Image (cartoon, rainbow, N blue to C red):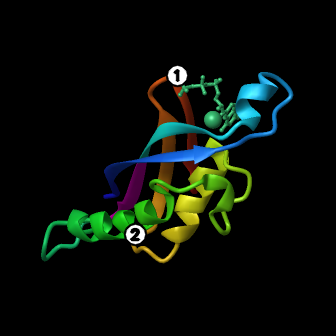
């Protein structure tokens, strides 16, 4: 039986973005509060009854958060253009050694309802 556990974190960060619409406001440095949810899918360990200790996942998410929170996302190494899409793949890459593996990363901004979901088969 496969089960999915998940954990959320948030970070406040600034960025700029080159776009074809709403160009001026996006090009200026501005900030957002981002929320992220990371899911891990796997079987339960028969001894401890856990897919993965959520405390372990929390520690890993804290180290990802430290790379993003109160940073200018344009300058974060390996992130690329600071879009929701690239934030999903950056977070997944940072957690690529977690076992059982990360099955989904979701990043969203509550203020305007924007969201991106990366499903990892
Ligand atoms: N496919 C994507 N499209 C857009 C992304 C993205 O990450 N992926 N990101 C943006 C921008 O971050 C943009 O700043 C959002 O701008 P806007 O819709 O104008 O929202 P506000 O900055 O006004 O929102 P507040 O959070 O209320 O300040 C655009 N497109
Ligand atoms: Zn923005």
Instruction: Give the labeled residue for mark 2.
Output: 63
Q: Residue at x 34, y 57 (%)?
A: 2
The quarter in which the C terminus is drawn is: bottom right
Q: Secondary structure at mark 2?
A: helix
Task: Quadrant for residue 17, please give it.
Answer: top right
Q: Residue at x 22, y 72 (%)?
A: 45
Q: Is disc 1 surrounded by few (<14), some (14 to 19) or many (20+) residues within 10 Å?
A: few
Q: What kind of secondary structure does the magenta stretch mostly adopt? A: strand
Q: How many marks?
A: 2
Q: Nearer the viewer, residue 3 or 107?
A: 107
Is ligand 1 within 8 Å of the beta carbon of the residue shown at mark 1? yes
Q: Position of residue 115 (x, y in %)?
A: 55, 33
Q: Nearer the viewer, residue 83 or 104?
A: 83
- The image quadrant where one finds ligand 1 is top right
Asked whether, in this view, residue 113 is left or right of residue 7, the answer is: right
Q: Position of residue 48 (x, y in %)?
A: 13, 73
Instruction: Give the labeled residue for mark 1.
Output: 112
Q: Is disc 2 surrounded by few (<14), some (14 to 19) or many (20+) residues within 10 Å?
A: few
Please give the range of residues in magenta.
37-43
Please identify the residue farthest to the right as the structure is shown: 20
Q: Earlier in the sequence, mark 2 or mark 1?
A: 2
Asked whether, in this view, residue 109 is left or right of residue 45, the answer is: right
Task: Quadrant for residue 39, please give it.
Answer: bottom left
Q: Residue at x 24, y 63 (%)?
A: 54
Asked whether, in this view, residue 39 is left or right of residue 23, the answer is: left
Q: Position of residue 59 (x, y in %)?
A: 30, 70
């Amino acid at each position: 039986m496969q089960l999915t556990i998940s954990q959320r974190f948030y970070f406040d960060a600034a960025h700029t973005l080159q776009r074809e619409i709403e160009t001026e406001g996006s090009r200026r440095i501005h900030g957002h509060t981002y929320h992220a949810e990371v899911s891990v899918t796997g079987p339960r360990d028969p001894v401890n009854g856990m897919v993965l200790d959520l405390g372990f996942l929390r520690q890993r998410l804290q180290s990802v958060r430290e790379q993003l929170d109160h940073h200018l996302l344009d300058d974060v190494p390996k992130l690329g253009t600071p879009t929701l899409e690239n934030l999903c793949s950056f977070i997944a890459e940072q957690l690529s050694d977690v076992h059982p593996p990360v099955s989904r990363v979701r990043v969203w901004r509550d203020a305007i309802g924007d969201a991106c979901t990366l499903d990892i088969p």
